[in-house]
Amino acid sequence: METTAQDIDTLFLEERRFEPSGDFAARANAQPEIYDRDFEEFWESEGRERVAWFEPFTKLYEWDPPYAKWYLGGKLNVAWNCLDKHVEAGRGSTVAYYWEGEPEDERREVTYADLLTEVTKLANGLKALGVGKGTPVGIYMGMVPETPVAMLACARLGAPHTVVFGGFSADSLAGRLQDMECEVLITQDEAWRRGTTVPLKKTADEAVAESPSVRHVIVLRRTGNVVPMEDGRDQWWHDVATDESECPAEPMDPEDLLYLLYTSGTTAKPKGIAHTTAGYLVGVAATHHYIFDLKRDEDVYWCAADVGWVTGHSYIVYGPLCNGATSVLYEGTPDYPDRDRWWAIAERYGVTILYTAPTAIRSHMKWGPEHAEKHDLSKLRLLGSVGEPINPEAWIWYHDHIGGSRCPIVDTWWQTETGMIMITPLPGITTTKPGSATKPFPGVDAAVFNDAGEEVGPGGGGYLVLRRPWPAMLRGLYKEHDRYVETYWSKYPNVYFAGDGARVDEDGDFWLLGRVDDVMNVAGHRISTIEVESALVDHQEVAEAAVAARNDATTGQAIVAFVTLKGGAEGSVTKLEELRNHVARKIGPIAKPANIVFTPELPKTRSGKIMRRLLRDVAENRPLGDTTTLADPTVVDEIRSRGAEEQSKED
Ligand code: WT7
């Protein structure tokens, strides 16, 4: 385990408790009996309650480890559940998204009826291009209403999508398009970000040039700046999406693929996480209903994540729309044009539920509470956190300065793989503790195991596992069965290994302690050390590279790279910038190392394995652990002194 004794001590000292208020409890969607419900009864009734079926399911689930199937025998369509279901029930004029562009004067109210029309038009256009059930489609867009429209148009036709985060590079996009063999890519001319434009189409062009399966590129006009269009391949969205005639929602099998979302693992190649139709939809809708306590005719819900990550898939698009929620969707950064932009938005739409990440909370903390104080946030009644462990101080700040000391906070633990929230407080029931994700969601069986596979009792630390299948669980890694088994199912027989350290306290509350593998968590996003290493070694002057994470006050973890240049060359500040930019080009700006330490050699064992543990100690400025297995023990002293130099250059 990579967690230190110190982490555990700090957590032990956290003794603040926040009881639910009586008013909240009285009206809460989740009542205490929810924890007594039988696993099968719970998921069966949720399956009927949250989702509308063309044909009812006949069997709850089948568990053939490590693969599960849920809601067998039914027929349904995800887009129908997110759109037609509400329009047919007379809720067509309800706002689905209050959208704000980053330029302040751009606002749109998109109702459920509008969304259905837009989805119908795009789906008809896609169909005319030959997209149908099973055709893989890539989506490379920013935070505009057309991104959910594109996802839903695919779901309507039964075409699985892969959304690629708009901050990813051409190489990252190409890798995903190639792996899934996408036939169509939907993108936009440019996106707005912090007052400048992000050239999505230009990046998409580079990626498509290396992705022979892509036959058509559909381009949304967003900023209106001129972008090159390739004859015969590229078409404007507004030319493709014109036919408003009805486009029937394809009746899908429960286990048909809904989407792939690629996420970092411990090798350079991202994993294609597969999510299917019925179990995923039930899982995200049920969790969204109880955890966010959604009252759809009263609440204005804002999940401030990017739609390109799983949080956006489950809790901006599929969960909230299936539940008929009114959401806020914001295109840009929180500090544009000023640091109060989020709070201006929250005030304007009367946001009642806000879901964001600890890294964002820490940025706001750094900027100071005065920005939130300028706005009326009195409608807020519930706050959520996701992406990494939240430090108790950030939790308290969020609680006091954003929640006005009156809103419950749900610290939700889950992963791209789990599809839905797995460990979380339930507002109105759970006594919360700053820094603890508290209890498994009803119908979820989580535990902490030691190395030998024994359950660890109260107070003990170990590895987080899930012992029973759940509806939204991944259905494997796309085209990589062995890797699926190896990554999640080989440490303990028939038990899902999440890759996170955790401990349970005397009350049975879970405290998440971070990743235990070679995966870093930067600003709530998983990045593997090996991906960054491969990007560095890809540079022609780099001989060898090793990457480790150190703690960072804002981003949670920051990337530190140790690099040996070819021919024994010395590093320089220019070289450092060049390598950082190289990584940004290969993966995306999010993976840029915060520091690079140039070193003539990396610490290796006698068998030639890089000792990452020591590099982490150096990165963290900690006393070194055991160095006796090093081939050349003097190497670390050298690196350490260089690391210190590098550190002082940064300050
Ligand atoms: C990893 C999953 C789930 C959507 C965003 C990230 C960490 C996530 C928490 C939390 C402690 C958390 C874990 C997990 N994580 N939420 N509330 N407390 N850690 O999705 O990229 O798949 O990353 O994020 O380490 O394994 P992801």
Image (cartoon, helix red, strand yellow):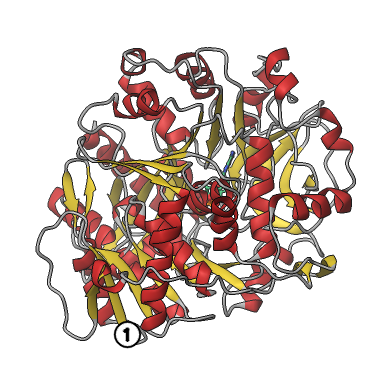
Q: Residue at x 40, y 74 (%)?
A: 124
Q: Position of residue 539 (x, y in %)?
A: 24, 68
| Front residue of this view, candidates 279 and 554 | 279
Q: Neighbour class for label 1 at 10 Å: few (<14), some, many (≥20)?
A: some
- To which quarter of the image does residue 222 belong? bottom left
Q: What's the amino acid at mark 1?
A: Arg
| Front residue of this view, candidates 293 and 532 | 293
Q: Residue at x 85, y 67 (%)?
A: 59
In-image side of 143 versus 455 (left or right): left
| Front residue of this view, candidates 43 and 566 | 43
In-image side of 335 versus 271 (left or right): left
Residue 343 vertical placement versus 469 (above, below): above
Q: Position of residue 538 (x, y in %)?
A: 29, 71
In-image side of 540 versus 533 (left or right): left
Residue 383 vertical placement versus 257 (above, below): above
- To which quarter of the image does residue 81 belong? bottom right
Q: Position of residue 369 (x, y in %)?
A: 36, 15
Q: Residue at x 23, y 58 (%)?
A: 579
Mark 1 lies on residue: 215
Q: Position of residue 160 (x, y in %)?
A: 51, 73
Give the position of the C terminus as an image quadrant: top left
